[in-house]
Image (cartoon, rainbow, N blue to C red):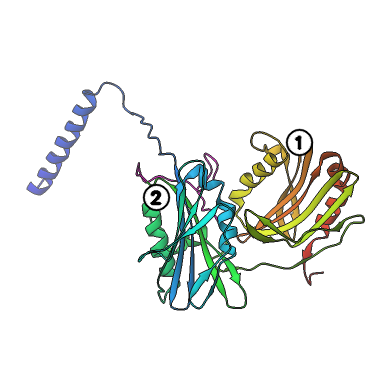
Amino acid sequence: MNDCSRRHWTGSILLLTCLLALVGCSDGNQIRRYTVEKPVPTDRMLAAIIPHSELAWFFKLSGPNETLAGLTETFFEFIDTVRISDDEPTWDLPSGWVRTPGSQTRFATIQISSQDEPLDLSVTRLPKMADETQLLLQNINRWRGQLQLPPLTEDLLPDESVKMELDAETGLTATLINIVGNLKGGGSGGAAPFAAAGAPRAGPFSGSPMSTVPKKTIEYATPEGWQPGQLVVSRGGISIARDAAFEVIDGNARAEITVTQLPASEQSLQQNVNRWRQQVGLAGDASPSELKDVDVLGVRGVSMELIGPQQAILGVIAVDGGLGWFVKLWGDRDLALRERERFQQFVGSIQFKGEQ
């Protein structure tokens, strides 16, 4: 054995001896398990990026997760009203939202009343970057850093944002962001805003493409006895356009049938179902047994019958590519149940305009 081999062999024996000594001196617990609890997300951020001409406009609202979860739909509906003319945005403010003067760094601040401290929605502008993907990445990652979340790479953008068409004539679009984390630190953990405990990680718009999500026109067969309803309504101080609206009246009993399309994600399904449950006076969260699979507009969705003490909702929700279709019959309990068969026929007749 030459000197090099001898030194290598001797070193190996010494190393093995040391390892055996460490094992022999242990307390017998060869494997120790540690449980590290991930921080529970306590804050949420809702934001929109709207490029226009040479500028990019940023709408951002952040605050307690529970508070903003209830404002998510209203925030997105507010963004849907934004238009830009003469290089300045205009919008319709929901009830309780008040615009205050801007500053050197802000175009405007919109104050929102809440049960806790008032919230501030900031509206700012910066020169637009030539590369829109980099514009999105830089700003979304900056916001994620504020929530103690890791940065995104380009391939993850489709899971964390969705584009909404604002004005088809001018091509104005908004990229929507909905993320939760911890604004005051406490680790880098975070969860998808609509993910259930233990569910695989997915972004708030998981499965939606980064391409524009245009609104689509539908057609349908109107059941006998359904009268035209209100196609444009005011909710929270802003106007919402419905794709279809009917009403059924029988004496003092009344039911309304509506079809509405809004930005949505599969992860927001439970949130919407629970909101409908509250509307008919039901407590608690929906159970899986209340939801049934259904096909509407060529998309797999869920149907439900939420029967409250006095009112009921027969509903269908289908989500595809960041766009949610909400078909809903809401009215007095007995009348709603009598209209069940006609409602099912109506849902089955809905199709995109021009399809056979």
Q: Write down the quadrant of residue 276 in the picture.
A: top right
Q: Residue furthest left?
A: 3
Q: Secondary structure at mark 2?
A: loop
Residue 46, percent from left and from top? 49, 55
Residue 194 among those drawn in magenta: yes
Task: Please provide the residue range marked out in magenta.
Answer: 184-205
Q: Magenta part mainly helix, strand or loop?
A: loop
- Residue 258: horizontal and vertical position, in percent? 76, 55
Q: CA distance from mark 1 to mark 2?
A: 39 Å
244 left or right of 238 in image? right
- Residue 194 seen in this snapshot: no
Precedes in sequence: disc 1 or disc 2: 2
User: Do the residues under discs 1 and 2 have CB atoms within 8 angstroms?
Assistant: no
**Which residue is pictured at 47% across the width and 78% down the height?**
53
Q: Residues within 10 Å of mark 1 (few under 14, many from 20)?
A: some
Q: Quadrant of residue 154?
A: bottom left
Badge nearest the viewer, 1 or 2 = 1
Instruction: Mark yes or no: residue 61 visible.
Output: yes
Query: Looking at the picture, how far across and down is residue 70, in whole percent?
Result: 56, 46
Q: Residue at x 52, y 51 (%)?
A: 202
**Can you say whether 123 is above or below 20 in the image?**
below
Q: Which residue is mark 2?
A: 147
Would you say 322 lies left or right of 352 here?
left
Left or right placement of residue 356 versus residue 161 in this view: right
* Amino acid residing under circle 1: Gly
Per the image, label 1 sits on a secondary structure element best described as loop
Residue picked out by circle 1? 308
Depth check, front residue: 89 or 349: 89
Instruction: Tell which residue pokes out farthest to the top in this image.
Output: 27
